[in-house]
Image: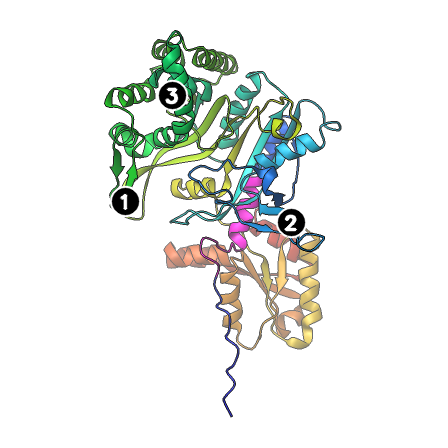
């Protein structure tokens, strides 16, 4: 008789491109989300939570670098009734903006106009993972739907600057860069020969422009990574990166590529100088001129509120990869240097971005509904604070009440209860209490600020021992013997004074 094989055990590992988050990481993220929500709330935005699952039709196809219909998202087809019919295609949301467009259309008769909302939560992208790049990540969005004025875009930029400073990014360590997709459209018209008065060239170029626009967008969006020459190569014959991978070029001439690179480098010493340089480059292209006028108005609105070039700049190199942007686009870049995994110095880069998307809600209603917003990458922002040393101290774990006698568990639980009622995080050690050293090791692994000790002798005298684990670690690390004696890390206090004594240790009393 053949031997029956035991069932294969599943591997205990996360899927590729995903990761788990433990206590301190979750606590830090929550603290950051609360801080960001506080800024959004002060600006008058209301919270909104939407489903993690949307129909593929509702999400639309707007992800960059994606050519297949449902690529870039995690999608599946539902069973349909009756049997044999095609069910709906569903997908995990890839951002928080597409679901907002669906909400704005679905509830348009019930929501105020403009509708100002913020949303926070995970999004999913079925993309190739890499170092620091995961398929699930958190975003923090704020959007205004129903306001066509660029005053709404200026407000988003100001709020983004305030948010970065609120979470701990110092002024001077970031810049919010602003451009306009209309200006980029004007650039394409100029580069591809669609100037006014050149009707025959324009007719031939319109189709060509629509066919090549996405490739050109992707190429110039890499300006901050590959530099001017890298963009020239991507726009013309193609470029091979350091790994040997070759990216096919867009087929522009050297002259056309030079015009594009000249545009990307048109940033002047002030926002006003940049806007004037853009006017010189775009010439009489109507759409480009309209976009430049909007940038000029945004700069003036921000300057009137005290947001100048040290915080928010007009930058022609900002593109934003998503295909639904129709007007101003913005990106928050951290300007300080970090050391990468290979020991090389580089700037940290972008942590937030957004822009105007006036046609996204129109997909559902057929009627124009202007909208603008921003999305902050929370995980990248936390990583930036770590790199800058501004992440703050690690959140304290609970006070651990140690167990010296199993028969007195009720007494230990009572101590923990007193601490919790006083607002102090606490727990009773529930492992095997036989080895007291293991209890202290547990407290250390939990990041506990203190441990409570009460044996039979202390119980008879009505006292407890409080071991200050933070002070103990500091003294053990760098204190002299005399300092150790003068400031012991373990003290005895009356049981009735337990809460007050711990509050002093925790800086609450």
Residue depth check, mark 3 versus mark 1: number of the one nearer the observer:
1
How far is mark 1 from mark 2, CA to CA? Answer: 39 Å
* Residue 410 in view of the camera: yes
How far is mark 3 from mark 2, CA to CA? Answer: 44 Å
Query: Residue at left 62%, top 43%?
Result: 54
Tell me the residue that label 3 is attached to. Answer: 316
Which disc, if any, is residue 87? 2
Choose between 131 and 257: the one closer to the eye: 257
The crowd level at tag 2 (other Cα within 10 Å; few <14, some 14-19, many 20+) is some
Q: Quadrant of residue 64?
A: top left
Describe the element under mark 3 as helix, strand or loop: loop
Left or right side of 227 for 457:
right
Left or right side of 460 for 353:
left
Earlier-in-chain disc, 3 versus 1: 1
Query: Residue at left 37%, top 24%?
Result: 317
**Can you give x and y, in whole percent of width and height, for residue 408 in the image?**
68, 73
**Can you give x and y, in whole percent of width and height, for residue 502 in the image?**
60, 54
Q: Is residue 335 above or below residue 481?
A: above
Choose between 247 and 153: the one closer to the eye: 247
Describe the element under mark 1 as helix, strand or loop: loop
Q: Are marks 3 and 1 in contact (CB under 8 Å)?
A: no
Left or right side of 227 for 504:
right
């Amino acid at each position: 008789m053949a031997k029956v094989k035991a069932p294969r055990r599943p591997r205990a590992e996360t899927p590729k491109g995903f990761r788990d988050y433990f206590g301190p990481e979750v606590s830090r993220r929550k603290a950051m989300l609360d801080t960001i929500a506080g800024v959004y709330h002060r600006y008058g935005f209301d919270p909104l939570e939407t489903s993690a699952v949307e129909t593929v039709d509702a999400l639309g196809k707007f992800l960059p670098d994606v050519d297949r219909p449902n690529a870039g998202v995690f999608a599946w087809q539902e069973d349909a009734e009756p049997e044999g019919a095609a069910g709906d295609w569903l997908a995990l949301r890839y951002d928080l903006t597409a679901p907002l467009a669906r909400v704005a259309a679905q509830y348009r008769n019930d929501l105020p106009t403009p509708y100002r909302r913020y949303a926070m939560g995970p999004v999913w992208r079925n993309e190739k993972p890499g170092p620091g790049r995961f398929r699930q990540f958190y975003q923090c969005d704020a959007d205004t739907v129903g306001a066509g004025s660029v005053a709404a875009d200026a407000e988003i930029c100001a709020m983004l600057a305030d948010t970065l400073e609120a979470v701990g990014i110092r002024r001077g360590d970031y810049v919010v860069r602003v451009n306009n997709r209309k200006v980029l459209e004007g650039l394409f018209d100029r580069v591809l020969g669609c100037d006014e008065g050149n009707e025959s060239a324009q007719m031939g170029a319109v189709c060509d422009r629509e066919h090549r626009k996405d490739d050109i967008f992707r190429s110039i969006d890499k300006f901050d990574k590959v530099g001017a020459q890298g963009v020239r190569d991507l726009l013309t014959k193609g470029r091979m990166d350091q790994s040997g991978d070759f990216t096919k070029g867009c087929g522009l001439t050297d002259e056309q590529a030079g015009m594009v690179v000249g545009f990307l480098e048109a940033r002047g010493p002030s926002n006003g100088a940049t806007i004037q340089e853009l006017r010189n480059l775009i010439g009489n292209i109507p759409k480009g001129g309209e976009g430049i006028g909007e940038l000029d108005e945004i700069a003036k609105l921000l300057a009137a509120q005290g947001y100048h070039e040290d915080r928010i700049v007009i930058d022609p190199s900002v593109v934003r990869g998503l295909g639904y942007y129709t007007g101003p686009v913005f990106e928050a870049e951290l300007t300080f240097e970090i050391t990468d995994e290979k020991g090389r110095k580089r700037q940290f880069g972008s942590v937030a971005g957004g822009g105007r998307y006036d046609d996204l809600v129109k997909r559902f209603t057929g009627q124009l509904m202007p909208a603008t917003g921003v999305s902050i990458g929370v995980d990248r922002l936390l990583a930036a604070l770590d790199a800058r040393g501004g992440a703050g101290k690690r959140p304290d774990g609970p006070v651990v009440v140690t167990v010296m006698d199993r028969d007195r568990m009720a007494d230990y639980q009572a101590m923990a209860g007193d601490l919790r009622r006083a607002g102090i995080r606490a727990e009773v050690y529930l492992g095997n209490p036989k080895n007291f050293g293991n209890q202290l090791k547990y407290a250390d692994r939990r990041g506990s600020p203190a441990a409570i000790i009460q044996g039979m002798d202390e119980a008879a005298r009505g006292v407890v021992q409080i071991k200050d684990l933070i002070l103990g670690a500091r003294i053990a690390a760098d204190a002299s013997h005399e300092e150790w004696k003068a400031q012991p890390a373990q003290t005895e206090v009356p049981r009735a004074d337990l809460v007050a004594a711990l509050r002093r240790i925790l800086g609450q009393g």
